Amino acid sequence: MTAPSPASSTPPASAESTVISIILAVATGHFLNDLMQSLIPASYPLLKSNLALSFTQIGLITFVFQGTASILQPLVGLYTDRRPLPYAMAVGMAMTGIGLVLLAQAASFAAVLISVALIGLGSSIFHPEASRIARLAAGMRPGFAQSVFQVGGNAGTALGPLAAGWIVLRHGQITIEWFAAVAMLGMLVLTLVGRWYIRAGAERAQARKARARSAAVLPADAVRFGMGLLMVLMFSKFIYQVSFSSYYAFYLIERYDLTESQALNCLFIFLAAVAVGTIIGGPIGDRIGRRRVILWSILGTLPLSLMLPLLPLVPTVIVAGLAGMVMASAFPAMVVYAQDLMPQHTGMVAGLLFGFGFGIAALGAAGLGVLADYVGITTVYQICAFLPAFGLFAFLLPDARH
């Protein structure tokens, strides 16, 4: 028998094509998932008033929600890399819907914590598997696919404050359960994605694994060093970002005397800018390299963050949006960069990065809440302005392409 030629082990061309419909379907699921999740921070002013919560308790709510999601995501990603679960995303969506129903009826701080823990659990199941399938459907355009996937989530996060302002703040906490209908729609969309994986995605996964095994392997020290630097950069990015998602509305209310609805509209502008930054970060990374995008997006936020606490209202809203847009462009590049470092473990890597990001955000929200109770929310923003300086570490990132 003759040995198989190298061409026989090359993945078929169909495995490298881009399946736009699946990428859009997963992004739609991400949009619906994050729309529901964003109701949690968007409802903080209402919950703070209804349950007489302190900033420390607000931070603990975020800590439980983000912490639940962060612990399980790498484990889910590691498991699905080995044994894919095509319908896991739909199950995660169902758990998020259940958590919303419980949150709508929560009459105590403990009940709020239980409900947001369920929502975090749904997130931990959804994100790593959804990111893995987006990578499978990407073909030769992983940055584009990751940006589309993530911008779906950012768009959902941006609409959360508007939904809370138009519906929840006007009609009361109980209306949060109306959004459980969104979970049912998400389950339908993600069930269809699961069926695609069974028909075609499994073959793509095998082809990608074969290609990853045949690719040049980076030295273990370089992989560890690159991943360690990514964690440092994500630390600065996610703590800075959670200072907005959890406390921006309170900052605007305290400093500029805005109403709750006006503050949530400003939060929407910031989160919409984050969505724009996310959609441009991945395709630019495909063209000029992930390392450059990571460097300029995080370090480039520094001058904007430093001037932000010094500005009047309208420039504050504009500069905050620009800072969110520039910094958000980093995350699609970070995910694809990490997957390039460890191409045989794309699900685990996605779960690790999403989980670490959620965990850092959880700890950051809790810490910033305690700090805000002691020194005031305005001082918190003056301190957070220096976080983008961690972007200097991006100069040390190894080039995964080599």
Image (cartoon, rainbow, N blue to C red):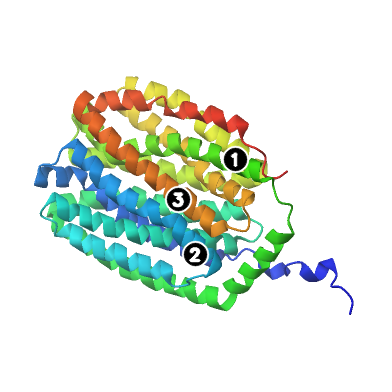
The residue singled out by tag 3 in the image is: 354
Q: Of label 3 and label 1, which has the lower sequence position?
A: 1
Q: Quadrant of the C terminus?
A: top right
Q: SS of the residue at dot 2?
A: helix
Looking at the picture, tell me which residue is in the foreground, 324 or 202.
202
The residue singled out by tag 2 in the image is: 79
Mark 3 surroundings: few (<14), some (14-19) or many (≥20) residues within 10 A? many
**Does residue 63 lie above or below 4 as drawn?**
above
Residue 88 location in percent, x, y?
42, 69
Q: Of label 2 and label 3, which has the lower sequence position?
A: 2
Residue 132 location in percent, x, y?
53, 61
Looking at the picture, tell me which residue is in the foreground, 69 or 162.
69
The residue singled out by tag 1 in the image is: 226
Which residue does the image show at 16% across and 55% down from the upper left? 111
Q: Quadrant of the N terminus?
A: bottom right
Mark 1 surroundings: few (<14), some (14-19) or many (≥20) residues within 10 A? many
Q: Callout 1, which amino acid?
A: Gly
Q: CA distance from mark 1 to mark 2?
A: 23 Å
Which residue does the image show at 49% across and 77% down from the upper left? 195
